[in-house]
Image (tube, rainbow, N blue to C red):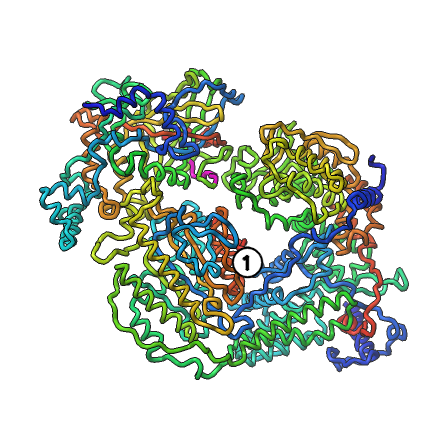
Amino acid sequence: MGYEISRRTALRGVVNGAAVAVGVPLLDAFLDGNGEAMAAPTATGGVAAVPVRFGTWFWGLGVNPNRWFPSKVGPGYDLKPELAPIKDYQNKINVYGNFNVPLDGAPNLPHASGGPAIRTGRALTAERGLPGESFDVTIGDLIGTRTRFRSLEMSSSGDPRNSLSGRGGGNLNPSEVSASALYTRIFGTGFKDPNSATFTPDPQVMARRSVLSAVTEQRQSLERAVGAADRQKLDQYYTSVRQLENQLDVQLTKPEPLQSCVVPRSVADLPVNAEIEHVILNHQLMTQLLVMALACDQTRIFNMMFNNGASSLTRIGSTITHHQLTHEEVLDNRLGYQPNATYFLTKIMEAWVGFVAALDGIKEGSRTLLDNTLVLAHSETEFAKFHTIDNIPIMTAGSAGGRMKTGIYVDGAGTPVSRVGLTLQQVMGVSLDRWGSKSMETSKSIGEVVA
Amino acid sequence: MKRVKLLKLATLGFAAASALAAGVGAVDTPPSIASPAPSAQAALAPQFQIVAMRRITEAQYRNTIADIFGPDVRVAGRFEPVVRPAHELIASGAREASISPAGLEQFDAMARGVAAQVFDESRRSQFAECQPADATKADADCAGKVLAPLGRLLFRRPLSAGERDFYVKLAGDSAGQTGSFYKGLELSLSAMLDSPNFLYVVETAEPDPANPGALRLDNYTRATRLGFMLWNSTPNEALLQAAQQGKLTDDAALAVIAGRMVNSPRFEQGLRAFFSDMLLFEKFDELAKDPVIYPYFNQDVAKALPEQTLRTITAHLLGKGGDYRALFTTPNTFMTRSLGPLYQVPVHKSAGWEPYQFAAGDDRAGLLGQAGFLSIYSHSGRSSPTLRGRAIRELLMCQPVPNPPGNVNFTAVQDVHNKATPTARSRLTAHSTDEVCAGCHKITDPVGLSLERFDGIGAFRAAENDTPIDSSGILDGMHFEGADGLGKTLASSPDTTQCVSSRALQYATGLGSEDVSPWVEALDKQFAASGYGIRALFLKVATMPATWQVKAAPLDQGATKISYAGQRR
Amino acid sequence: MMRSAGNRRLARCSAAIAALLALGPMTGASGPLGSPAVGEATDRTLPRPPANGEMGFVVSSLAQTVVPGLDACPNGTVPRLRDAWLETLPPEEHARLKLKENIQEFERGWQSYAFGANGTNICSQPDIFDHPLIRTVQSPYAFGLNLDEDAAPNSTCTHENFSSPTGEKGIDNQVYRAMGCTLEWRGVDGSGGDITRGSKQFHSSGEWTQVLLLRGVDSLQNDNDVEVVYANTSDRPNVDTNGNFLSGVSFTINNTAPRYRNVLRGRIVNGVLTTRPQDIVLTETWGQGGARDIRGARSKWEMRQGRLQLAFQPDGTLRGLVGGYRPIFDVYQAMALGGAGTALVAGIDCAAYHATLKKLADGIRDPKTGQCSGVSSAEQMSAVPAFVNDVPTGQRTAAR
């Protein structure tokens, strides 16, 4: 075919010729993949009357990567020995691997850099505090302003400064370390039974509602002058406005009683220290109190620290710490891990499953408290012996009221860990399109897990 | 000045009259304006109508907010994408795009975010020249002075008196509720940003005096088209004034204004948007490669690839005023540290971009030798002559290629470890023994196979599975060798210049390829006469009558045609 | 000294062992580390150098060398501080302290072994403590270079030489002799400890990337005069998913203080580039710790009378050794960075390590006292091709 022939003819020739040869009509199936309507995460509260909560669960000193991270990406991931405890809840837990923490030349401060990077999307430069606002606080600004507690911080191994939540700089939300003190704080003086409390509509929501009404009021003037195709678009637009109005109306109505809210009995004083046996018990008690605090809508944001970064966990009768073991115990080349240090990891994973189970044990309508919550669980290092901070183990549990897909292993392929924070914030309704700084700045959320 | 006033009176009067004539309530019409006698013709036949509603894109939204409120006002949120129709531009898709509940929720969140920033304490004085009598109470007079100019900028036309009253009242009501004048302004501004008048470019038409019975786009619609077509942003003050003065329906004045716009540095932003649309740059957002197969690919590379291509395009077409066809053969491009390893070339600057020229005889020539094109049209773990060939046909020559049928067995193509078929060429040959497949692959593969010396991320390779790669290609009967040969062949094909001409016209009008086809050959001839300069092409598009004509489409039965457009002019 | 059976076998089959080493765990399972640890010439055809004679490389691995096997340490590996303290006590005390009821006493006891008066500790002030020396390498084999072959008289101190596993005599590597039986170097099973993986980890983090720029190369086979710029860059390397360095990446030699840019001269004989002895100074950044403590203070990496011995490989890479005398403090500092934590958390007896290094010092001799304050050392090095941008010509003379 020469070039003298006109473009139109050439085009027809190609297409018709091909159509004949192939013998099939043109399919629309190969439309570019961006045609799908976006998922519909709702901002504050969603259409359900049940609130959606966000929280974190932290453990120190990482994992043995080859014994923890799944090999199979996507749904139905495989469970290696150290992840096996989550088996019963696997369909409600996502695992995230191969997300990196690029520090852009800032030092990797052992046990200090990893956690804040996940929470703030920034590299830590001082040994203490946070390099920016942790995103649980950002989410709290959105969903935590109307409950009695903006958030609850807990540390089950006894150090009130063990916290990764705060506005940045020296500001850290201190952790409650004793279960009995936590009880008093939540259910002592000042506790109001949510089911008997009066309802005051949120003025912010009312203001938004009036904006949408205003938009609708102008509908007629525009519709009069449009053709059929544009009318259809306008109809869709106003249907969307109506739907958003309905969502807000739900929030402006007194919610249904919280059926699962039962005020627990008080908790006895227990030793608070870093002995693993005590930590496990303390964590259990705190978890039970937290679960009721959530069921009774006393808070919608929480941060639980199981142990600290350079973990001071010990076993009763021994003084050697978890942290010591990770460094002192030589990597057994045949086993491929440190057996004594790994003992603690097993206990940690069991505690995590206990935490998830406690949330899942509370029914909320057709779902459970866990389903209506999104919990981010993570450590501060990948493999503690070398203080590695790329590929820090991360999980999420719960679906934030159906906004997250669950039961998936995500391979981050070396992309920055801030993608996790960006995604979770977006899922929780924070309006932002990029997050993190320098090499950790990202606008790519993790599409695989967004429902 | 006098003329403007007259115009205003006339249109307002016309609106009131037609609203009455149509029997609808004059809700938006100020009652104080006396209505002159309506012309009989106006009462009988609709003359102003909305002819298109085009949703603004993410980039247009961002540019608009930056232009009106300043670049420091952050727009944070996810945008519902405008869907690209098969084989067309996103600019055409914008005519079809509706807004879903999730999309609106995001727009609403962004609107509130923008409005809160605009009227926060640090910025409000920039936008509110007057002070309220009491900052805790409504002040209709001051609110009107603040909101009317902003409404004009956001809706790309002056607000009607009814609209102005409406937004002032909204601000007043909200000020009452919140006890803050500025909170009231904030809410009213949110409502404007949520309005379809902002989220859509509402294109309106008026009778064409030169063409009795036909319609032409009116002045404000023209201002908006020029703004988005040439600068990818909302019309600026100068354009809105030109519209107000009726200059944009005056051919001579229009040519002067458009000429100024294509010669402005801001045209680069417009040109980037055009080529991002034409070359399907949204694919870069989803670009992912298997890191085990391609260790040289990472997120920094992914970020740099579209930028390299856009820099190459704008430096050649604008910086040098170069011939469009030479985009397929130019050895000049730009490098940055993250791309150096992929190309295996030295990069001197530790940060930023630097010009780079491939040596004579290097197979990397033109856009098709760039890793951006080569990696998008590849799979995550292997190259694809078929995808590359198809993209060249569809994107650069505007020749749609049919999709494969649903039941194809791709095993032969995918098995890159089969020793019997070590190269893509041999695998495709095996695949194409199936006659059903052969028909289409004949169109794409001989073109794409010439690029096989570049792997799935566009890195150079001489061999695949230890077998030397044959990079000969055929395009419409022309035989050639490698990317260099392909570039030369494309540069000499009239299809490529006709294609970009067609795309430019589609981009301006939002019409599809079929709709603009009657004008393409003539446009291409004028493009040729200019030496295939891109400024000349866009100037031509901006000044040709076809761009501003409107196909009269029948309105909905029973719809009242005039009141909206009529009352606002 | 008695040779163990294993050593005799090793001597007979040195060539085979050397080949084995290339694949052994000591050099890592794969990647650039899985290569001969010595700069052996290759008989395969080498590519021609570029026309301008300039070749850039980025150092892709730099790690201590260990000849594997437990027989190098017939008395076992160096005990942790807890056990080192026990060894200072009479045997009957061992049993008593290990009883469950005495665990607190045991813990107090060994931990106090890390501290002295006024809060001093064995890692921050190792020289004021008198701990017994640690177990040292008893095998006659080590990787390394013959550093004192052409040394000036009275410039070194008395020491024993090693032989290389391939039979080369006169190998100087007192760092290996001193440290080679620690668990960090030897590992529990003798196949190599944490230093290999640790070095790779630190190195690929890119915090102290080194580059080589060769000038005046006429042939990769034989060339009488080659200039080698050996310098630091603050540009970060690109690595694959396994942490292996990618080739063809551009780097710019640091032109801001501290600017370490060593200009060496050497020659190529049978495909092996060897540079003439010269003091080499580079930065060493462990990236562990903030700027306010010793860990964050970026240290120097010095090789006095240092030299490179690197073989050109057919795949374009360089493999071999960098050797020289390292000031004791530098060697020691890398371990003792954590202060008392090094002793308590990692169980390292810093005072004993320090005393052992001091005793085995064989270089950097003070002409007045006759004391040596440096230890001979050799590290395995590999480098992959890179584009190296030198500092601008006019500013090169300012280099140290």
Residue B314 screen position, x and y as percent? 66, 43
The chain containing the residue under callout 1 comes to A
B415 and A127: which is toward the camera:
B415
Residue A69 belongs to magenta span: no
Residue C229 screen position, x and y as percent? 41, 27
Residue C387 screen position, x and y as percent? 50, 31
Element class at badge 1: loop
Give the residue type that dot 1 points to: Asp
Query: Magenta part mainly helix, strand or loop?
Result: loop
**Toward which corner of the image does residue B302 lie, by quadrant?**
top right
Q: Is residue B522 visible?
A: yes
- Tell me where the magenta segment starts and ends, as one range: C233-240
**Toward which corner of the image does residue C206 lie, by quadrant?**
top left
Lateral position of residue C295 relative to residue B76, left or right? left
| Residue at x 42%, y 69% (from the top left corner) | A361
Residue C24's place in the image compared with A121, above or below, is above
Query: Dot 1, how many residues are within 10 Å of its Cα: few (below 14), some (14-19), or many (20+)?
Result: some
The C terminus of chain B: image quadrant: bottom right
Give the residue number, with chain letter if any, for mark 1. Answer: A433
| Residue at x 20%, y 28% (from the top left corner) | C372
